[in-house]
Image (tube, grey):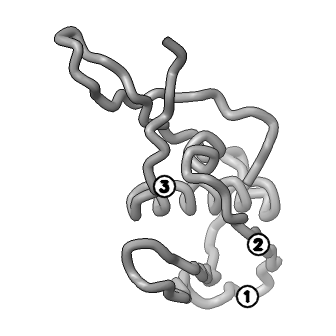
Amino acid sequence: MAEQTAALPIDGEELVKMIQFKVGEALRKDCFLKAHFNYSDFGGSVEVRLWLGGQIKKVDIRTTIDLGPRPENAEEREASFEIENQPPDELRVATEQDVQVVSKDDEGRTVLKPVHYARKGKRL
Protein backbone atom coordinates (compact mmCIF):
# COMPACT_ATOMS: atom_id res chain seq x y z
CA MET A 1 0.00 0.00 0.00
CA ALA A 2 1.38 3.42 -1.00
CA GLU A 3 1.76 6.02 1.72
CA GLN A 4 -1.16 8.37 2.09
CA THR A 5 -0.70 11.66 3.90
CA ALA A 6 -3.32 12.68 6.41
CA ALA A 7 -3.61 16.20 4.84
CA LEU A 8 -4.11 17.84 8.24
CA PRO A 9 -4.40 21.64 8.49
CA ILE A 10 -1.28 23.34 9.78
CA ASP A 11 -1.38 24.14 13.50
CA GLY A 12 -0.03 27.13 15.40
CA GLU A 13 3.15 25.41 16.59
CA GLU A 14 3.95 24.26 13.05
CA LEU A 15 3.49 27.87 11.86
CA VAL A 16 5.91 29.07 14.55
CA LYS A 17 8.52 26.51 13.39
CA MET A 18 7.96 27.47 9.75
CA ILE A 19 8.43 31.19 10.53
CA GLN A 20 11.57 30.46 12.59
CA PHE A 21 12.94 28.39 9.72
CA LYS A 22 12.25 31.13 7.16
CA VAL A 23 13.66 33.92 9.37
CA GLY A 24 16.86 31.91 9.95
CA GLU A 25 17.18 31.20 6.24
CA ALA A 26 16.72 34.91 5.38
CA LEU A 27 19.20 36.08 8.04
CA ARG A 28 21.86 33.68 6.81
CA LYS A 29 21.28 34.49 3.12
CA ASP A 30 20.26 38.16 2.98
CA CYS A 31 22.02 39.51 6.07
CA PHE A 32 25.12 37.33 5.72
CA LEU A 33 24.98 36.14 9.34
CA LYS A 34 27.41 33.26 9.56
CA ALA A 35 28.88 31.28 12.44
CA HIS A 36 32.40 32.49 11.60
CA PHE A 37 31.46 36.20 11.78
CA ASN A 38 31.44 37.87 15.21
CA TYR A 39 29.75 41.08 16.30
CA SER A 40 30.63 43.17 19.35
CA ASP A 41 27.17 44.72 19.39
CA PHE A 42 23.95 44.72 17.39
CA GLY A 43 20.47 46.17 17.29
CA GLY A 44 17.45 46.00 15.07
CA SER A 45 13.83 45.08 14.85
CA VAL A 46 11.84 42.24 13.37
CA GLU A 47 8.32 42.64 12.01
CA VAL A 48 6.01 39.71 11.42
CA ARG A 49 2.69 40.07 9.66
CA LEU A 50 0.34 37.09 9.33
CA TRP A 51 -3.00 36.54 7.69
CA LEU A 52 -4.72 33.60 9.33
CA GLY A 53 -7.95 31.83 8.48
CA GLY A 54 -9.51 28.57 9.54
CA GLN A 55 -11.26 27.77 12.79
CA ILE A 56 -11.26 31.42 13.76
CA LYS A 57 -12.32 34.28 11.53
CA LYS A 58 -9.64 35.62 9.22
CA VAL A 59 -7.32 37.94 11.07
CA ASP A 60 -4.42 40.19 10.12
CA ILE A 61 -1.71 40.12 12.79
CA ARG A 62 1.28 42.47 12.86
CA THR A 63 3.92 42.47 15.58
CA THR A 64 7.32 44.12 15.88
CA ILE A 65 10.14 42.83 18.08
CA ASP A 66 12.71 45.44 19.15
CA LEU A 67 16.25 44.10 19.43
CA GLY A 68 17.77 47.36 20.69
CA PRO A 69 19.01 50.62 19.19
CA ARG A 70 21.33 50.79 16.21
CA PRO A 71 24.96 50.84 17.38
CA GLU A 72 27.07 53.76 16.23
CA ASN A 73 28.77 53.17 12.85
CA ALA A 74 26.81 49.96 12.31
CA GLU A 75 26.09 48.71 8.81
CA GLU A 76 22.40 48.04 8.20
CA ARG A 77 21.24 44.87 6.48
CA GLU A 78 17.69 43.92 5.61
CA ALA A 79 15.89 40.72 4.79
CA SER A 80 12.30 40.21 3.83
CA PHE A 81 10.29 37.37 2.39
CA GLU A 82 6.75 36.42 1.57
CA ILE A 83 5.19 33.11 2.48
CA GLU A 84 2.88 32.00 -0.27
CA ASN A 85 -0.29 30.15 0.55
CA GLN A 86 0.54 26.48 -0.01
CA PRO A 87 -0.99 23.18 1.06
CA PRO A 88 0.05 22.41 4.67
CA ASP A 89 2.08 19.32 3.75
CA GLU A 90 4.11 21.29 1.19
CA LEU A 91 4.89 23.88 3.89
CA ARG A 92 5.91 21.10 6.29
CA VAL A 93 8.32 19.56 3.76
CA ALA A 94 9.73 22.96 2.71
CA THR A 95 10.51 23.83 6.34
CA GLU A 96 11.86 20.38 7.25
CA GLN A 97 8.94 19.33 9.47
CA ASP A 98 7.33 15.89 9.62
CA VAL A 99 4.26 15.02 7.57
CA GLN A 100 1.58 12.84 9.18
CA VAL A 101 1.01 9.66 7.16
CA VAL A 102 -1.90 7.26 7.57
CA SER A 103 -0.58 3.84 8.57
CA LYS A 104 -1.58 0.62 10.34
CA ASP A 105 -0.12 -0.45 13.66
CA ASP A 106 0.74 -4.06 14.63
CA GLU A 107 -2.87 -4.70 15.62
CA GLY A 108 -4.27 -3.40 12.31
CA ARG A 109 -5.58 -0.10 13.71
CA THR A 110 -5.31 3.02 11.58
CA VAL A 111 -2.79 5.43 13.10
CA LEU A 112 -0.91 8.57 12.09
CA LYS A 113 2.84 8.21 11.73
CA PRO A 114 5.21 11.20 11.40
CA VAL A 115 7.41 10.90 8.29
CA HIS A 116 10.26 13.24 7.40
CA TYR A 117 10.55 13.88 3.66
CA ALA A 118 13.72 15.40 2.23
CA ARG A 119 13.24 18.94 1.01
CA LYS A 120 13.66 19.30 -2.73
CA GLY A 121 14.81 22.39 -4.62
CA LYS A 122 11.57 24.37 -4.17
CA ARG A 123 11.75 27.08 -1.54
CA LEU A 124 8.85 28.84 0.14
Tag 2 near tag 3, CB within 8 Å? no
Residue pointed to by mark 2: 80
Q: Secondary structure at mark 2?
A: loop
Side (left or right) of 72 relative to 96: right
Point 49% across, 44% down: residue: 7
- Place residue 100 in its image quadrant: top left
Of the numbered discs 2 and 1, the one sitting upstream in the chain is 1
What residue is shown with label 1? 72
Left or right: 41, with 109 as reference point: right
Q: Nearer the viewer, residue 73 or 62?
A: 62
Decide which of 109, 72 is in the foreground and name it. Answer: 109
Circle 1: element type: loop
Residue in the image at 50% along x and 84% along y: 58
Task: Classify mark 2: residues with Cα within 10 Å, few (<14), some (14-19) or many (20+).
Answer: few
Number of residues whose C-alpha sits closer than 10 Å to that of mark 3, classed few (under 14), some (14–19) or many (20 or more): some
Amino acid type shown at disc 1: Glu
Residue 110: x and y in percent read: 27, 25
Residue type highlighted by circle 2: Ser
Q: Is residue 104 left or right of residue 38?
A: left
- Residue 17: give x, y in percent of width and height: 48, 55
Which of labels 2 and 1 is toward the front? 2
Residue bearing the label numbered 3:
17
* Of marks 3 and 1, the one in the foreground: 3
